[in-house]
Image (cartoon, rainbow, N blue to C red):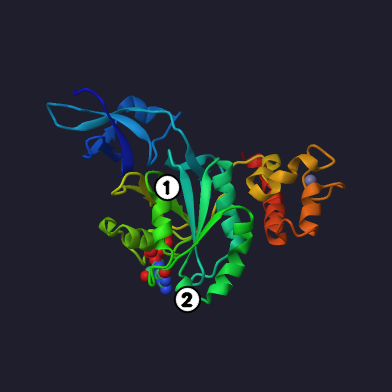
Amino acid sequence: MTEPAVGDVLGGTGGVWQVRTKDGMVRNAFLRGRLKRSTVMKIAVGDEVEVEQDLASGAWAISAIHPRKSKLARREPGSGYGERVVAANVDQVVVVFAAARPEPHTRMLDRFLVIAEANELVSRVVVNKVDLVPEADAARTFADYERAGYSVHYTSTKTRAGLDALHDSLAGVSSIFSGPSGVGKSSLLNAMFPGLNLRIGEISESVNKGRHTTVGAVMHPLPDGGYVVDSPGLREVGMWHLAAGELDRCFPEFRPYLGDCRFGDCSHLVEPGCAVREAVEAASISAARYDSYARLRAELEESPKKW
Ligand SMILES: Nc1nc2c(ncn2[C@@H]2O[C@H](COP(=O)(O)OP(=O)(O)OP(=O)(O)O)[C@@H](O)[C@H]2O)c(=O)[nH]1
Ligand SMILES: [Mg+2]
Ligand SMILES: [Zn+2]
């Protein structure tokens, strides 16, 4: 065995993981038996690992997984149990929606953002395909997100609008592109980083409707440092296993009001003296965002038995 080398997991299928070691080489590595049987930690894209080469066979093995600095996890779809780590050690989530084709469903956007917040990750919102609608329409649909404090990028891979600013926001950090299928995640990455050559125009889930079990995220090193993870589009976003009482903090624009409700454990749904609802009435918080909160809260209260 060689001395262990540290590397980052770029992707993997069927037990073989692509690990990029510090020298820039990508090794195909198997998981050591001991780690394979471990139920404590399953490897994910973005994990930092140690690899060793067997000098006789030339085969590489992953001998250790380093603790994660962060992770983006969501509920294992369909099963109801357990979480799936989509990517480890990411610095930010780039939630991509389209201005049209497919029509943007902001309630779904709220789910994506809540999952990122629940994982304590910074998000930015990308509104792609702005070439398809009048600028003012896109701005109106996504104004709530700018007001909530998110960075919102309006982009088009056809006109190249917004691509430079988005490109700059990815430099030197690790980002995951997330969002529904067909919104242009891979197209955006190709337009900004032509060397990536990602496949586009595919509906990743056509074989496995409504589920998302086999197709994994892949992480790409960026030319000027940093990584970007292209993940397959999601049709259904399983809520992260979040306690109902923690949902309010996942709406950044609610946070200034959270200490001001009459009851410390206010659900912000029915209680008198609720500072959040007062802010909604005063139009300081968007009614649509609040409505998403109320729906997600109901969903979380129905499901705790599942966890
Ligand atoms: N009009 C327009 N079409 C775009 C734009 N960006 C991407 N598209 C088209 O949208 C379709 C889907 O693009 P993809 O990049 O494959 O979308 P994706 O989000 O990666 O989809 P999944 O991999 O299935 O999650 C393709 O036909 C692209 O050509 C854009 O800015 N404007
Ligand atoms: Mg794609
Ligand atoms: Zn309240």
From where the camera sits, is residue 205 visible?
A: no
Between residue 8 and residue 123, name the one nearer to us.
Answer: 123
| Left or right of 182 on screen, residue 301 | right
Q: The N terminus is located in which quarter?
A: top left
Residue sitting at x 77%, y 45%? 267
Estimate the x, y position of residue 216 in percent, counting from the top left: 38, 49
Label 1: few (<14), some or many (≥20) within 10 Å?
many
Q: Are marks 1 and 2 in contact (CB under 8 Å)?
A: no
Amino acid at dot 1: Ser
Estimate the x, y position of residue 121 in percent, counting from the top left: 52, 43
Estimate the x, y position of residue 160 in percent, counting from the top left: 38, 68
Residue sitting at x 39%, y 55%? 167
The furthest residue to the left:
56
Determine which residue is flagged by label 1: 175
Residue sitting at x 43%, y 58%? 165
| Left or right of 94 on screen, residue 186 | left
| Left or right of 182 on screen, residue 151 | right
The Cα–Cα distance between marks 1 and 2, rounded to whole angstroms, is 26 Å
- Helix, strand or loop at disc 1? strand
Q: Which mark is residue 132?
A: 2
Q: The C terminus is located in which quarter?
A: top right
Which badge, 1 or 2, comes first in the chain's sequence?
Answer: 2
